[in-house]
């Protein structure tokens, strides 16, 4: 059975750091685009960052550029999102998702077939 499992959320003070993990179960991330999305209460789900497992290309939303870093550990079939200099406005449920495409823009949610259950990130001021 195919699963995407995201983890690593928690409560942190503003300025702190967290590292989220996205692991595949039942398939490999080869030739997939892995994206991180977030959804705050009362807001629409938004794309945060994505990485192509095919060529390593990455993309960041303007709101996180320079603070978040996405990376991939091929041996562990896991993608990470390192979040530094966290702000209260980063508070949201973060979701990992996998698209069976060499490159899938974050705006194309329909391309992302497999979604994690979400992990809560709370940044206190």
Image (cartoon, grey):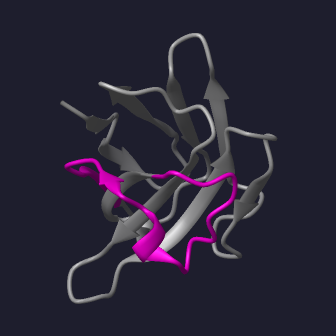
- Residue occupying the point 43% across, 33% down: 21
Per the rendered image, the range of residues in magenta is 99-123
Between residue 19 and residue 36, name the one nearer to us. 36
Residue 6 place in picture, x, y as percent: 32, 39
Height in image: 117 above or below 46? above
- Left/right placement of residue 87 relative to residue 88 reads right
- Residue occupying the point 61% across, 52% down: 85
- Left/right placement of residue 71 relative to residue 56 reads left
Residue 95 place in picture, x, y as percent: 34, 55
Height in image: 59 above or below 102? below
Q: Is residue 61 magenta?
A: no
Between residue 106 and residue 14, name the one nearer to us. 106
- Residue occupying the point 69% across, 59% down: 103
Quadrant the N terminus occupies: top left
Q: Is residue 107 magenta?
A: yes
- Residue occupying the point 60% across, 31% down: 30
Would you identify the image quadrant in which residue 10 lies? top left
């Amino acid at each position: 059975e195919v699963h995407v499992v995201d983890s690593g959320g928690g409560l942190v003070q503003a300025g702190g750091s967290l590292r989220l993990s996205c692991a595949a179960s039942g398939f490999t991330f080869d030739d997939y685009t892995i994206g991180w999305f977030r959804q705050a209460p009362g807001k629409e789900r938004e794309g945060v960052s994505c990485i192509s497992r095919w060529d390593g290309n990455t993309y960041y939303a303007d709101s996180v550029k320079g603070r978040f870093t996405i990376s991939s550990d091929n041996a562990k079939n896991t993608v990470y999102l390192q979040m530094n200099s966290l702000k209260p406005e980063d508070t949201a449920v973060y979701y990992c998702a996998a698209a069976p495409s060499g490159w899938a823009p974050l705006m194309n949610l329909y391309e992302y077939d497999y979604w994690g259950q979400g992990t809560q990130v709370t940044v206190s001021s």
